Structure formats: structure tokens, C-alpha cells
Amino acid sequence: MAARTGAASARSKTAIPQLAFSAVRPAPIVLVTGPEDVLAERAITMLRDFLRTEDPSLEVSDLEADGYRRGELLTLASPSLFGEPRLIRVSAVEKSSDDFLLDALDYLGQTAEATTVVLRHRGGQRGKRLLDAIRAGTGAGIEIVCAELKRDADKQDFAVAEFRAAGRKISPGALRALVAAFSDDLRELSAACRQLIADSPGDISEAVVAKYYGGQVETNAFAVADAAIAGRYGEALIALRHALDSGADPVPMVAAFAMKVRTMAKVSGARGGGAQLASSLGLAPWQVDRARRDLAGWTDAGIGVAIEALAATDAAVKGAERDPVFALERLVGIIAARGRA
């Protein structure tokens, strides 16, 4: 974490620094924005730990902006008898009550000495006046931007930061394997990093990652689906069997296929740019781009066959047939053939 002084402002249209979660530092107001809760939690925890190293007598208080009662913020921020530093963490600012917004705007003009107020805002228009005031420089704050991590490269940067914060290193191969195993859930990736840090001395190698997460590293439901959708039948079948041997449940494996095929069906034939199309379909732009790549070699008729096969397989793995493994293998064949007989 950067020290209290000397932190450079990121390039931004705002008047205050906009920093990554790993660069969080003390300020009178710390605005934590964006939908990625894991990054927000890490930033707030790092800030608390830093403040406690500066003064172990730090007094920590929590407020909920949506259930706020008038005067609570000013009461908590008022100087104590012994002058202990204070950290006030405010959650759900995107759902703020009117009382909280009034008090928070008042507080910006008279921030308390030795007090850090953290405002967690996940997104949306509620509280915009407050956010605009902070970003304009009122209250001498900073903003920690916690956008959703979509690219593997961003998730690798997150994992590296986790190990670096613990004074540890991870090899490039081990990093790629770890992110591949938990690419669909940042919270699980964070938990895996913490487990490796706690249980494995020294640098983290590919062998260490394989020891703890071998089954997940080598395959997961989406890896099976990706191989089948791309027409790589043999690879998909091997991956499926390995996943099942590693204890994977057939039901979520069918769900992974269904998620990807339904997204392809939504995007198939649709026109427009990624962002515009994503908004109209209720998807993220990266999901639209990925679906367009997945659609190579597919026809609308083939997608229809795949959807019917998915419905039948979903019923099969939930008890309609005696052999759920055979049903999954049959589905892989249909998908890998892109719905063609």
C-alpha cells in the first residue's frame, strides 16, 4: 500500500485520484466503487490493516447507508476523549436513505481529523450528487475502482497482487494454471490464493498448484463445453471423463453447456456493436464477443438441435435415465457435431 503522502493521481476526468484496489491508501474519504465485491473487500481490508499498523488503537465502526438514521455519521466521526483514529465503513451507498445523503454531503465540508470514511457504492444513479461532490474534490478523497474482472490477464494480475501482499511469488505456469481452474469465480480464486499462501511454504510452482487443485486445473465444466462447441470431440470427451473421475457433478456440467449455448442462441443473427447488443440482450460485451466466436461453424438449425439435446440431457442427469454419464457423452457428441446428424 502507498504511504499517506506522495501518491500520484491516476489519469482521470475527476479531480481526485482513481486507484486500483491494491493501491488503496488512507484519505479522509475513500470512495470504493464498482460491482466487483471481492476487490472492494480486499481494498477495505488492506486499508484497515494499514491504519492499524499506524495506530493499533484504531476504532472501527460500520454503518449501512440504506438503514441509516440522521446524525449517526457525525456522531461516530466526532473526536473521542482519547483521540483514537477512526475508520468508518459505510456499505450500500447505492441504496442510501435520504438522511444518509444529507449527512454525508454535510460531512464532506467538515471532515474530521484522524478519521477515514469508506463509502462502498456498487453502481447505479442513487447517490450521484454525493459521488459527484467527492469526485470534484470536496472532502479530499480518493476513489478505488473495483470494476468486474473479465479477462484472464486481469485475473492473473489480481492473483499476483494477492501473493505479493503476502511476500510470496508464483511462477508464470502456476499462475496460468490457477487462474484457469478458477476463472469463473473471483471469490474462489482469492480463496485458493489464500490457501496456497497459508499451506505451502516458499514460492508457488506448477507442482504445488497441481497438488492442491489438479482436478480443477486440468478440466472444468466450461473447458468441456468450450472444446465441444469448437468441434473438438475427442478433447471434449477426454476432458469430460477426467472431470467425472475427479468428482464433478453431471448437473452443473449440463448447466455450463446450457449457459453457453443459450448465449449463442441469443447472439445468433443479432446485429449491432458489442456494447449496444449486450445492452439489448442483457449480457456483458465480452459475453457477446465470446458467443460470436463460438458461433463459427454453427447454423440456427444446429443450435435448435443442441437446445433440444440439452433439455433431454438435463432431465436425464436428474433421474429420467439410468446412466447420466452416457447422457453427458451423448450430449458432447451432439454439440461437437454442431447439431448436425
Image (spheres, helix red, strand yellow):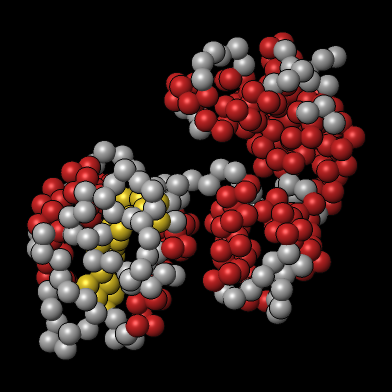
Quick one: quadrant of the C terminus? top right
Where is residue 195 shown, x and y percent of the image? 63, 70
Farthest residue to the bottom: give it: 82
Q: Residue at x 69, y 66 (%)?
A: 170
Viewer can see residue 335: yes
Where is residue 119 shown, x and y percent of the image? 28, 58
Front residue of this view, candidates 233 and 295: 295
Look at the picture and state if 259 lies above or below 123.
Answer: above
Quarter of the image holding residue 140? bottom left
Where is residue 79 shown, x and y percent of the image? 13, 78
Left or right of 217, for residue 140? left
Number of numbered labels in the structure image: 0
Front residue of this view, candidates 19 and 205: 19
Q: Residue at x 25, y 69 (%)?
A: 116
Look at the picture and state if 55 lies above or below 164.
Answer: below
Front residue of this view, candidates 11 and 161: 11
Farthest residue to the right: give it: 234
Quarter of the image holding residue 323? top right
Q: Residue at x 59, y 76 (%)?
A: 167
Viewer can see residue 127: no
Quick one: quadrant of the N terminus? bottom left
Left or right of 177, for residue 16? left
Look at the picture and state if 78 lies above or below 299.
Answer: below
Q: Residue at x 62, y 16 (%)?
A: 268
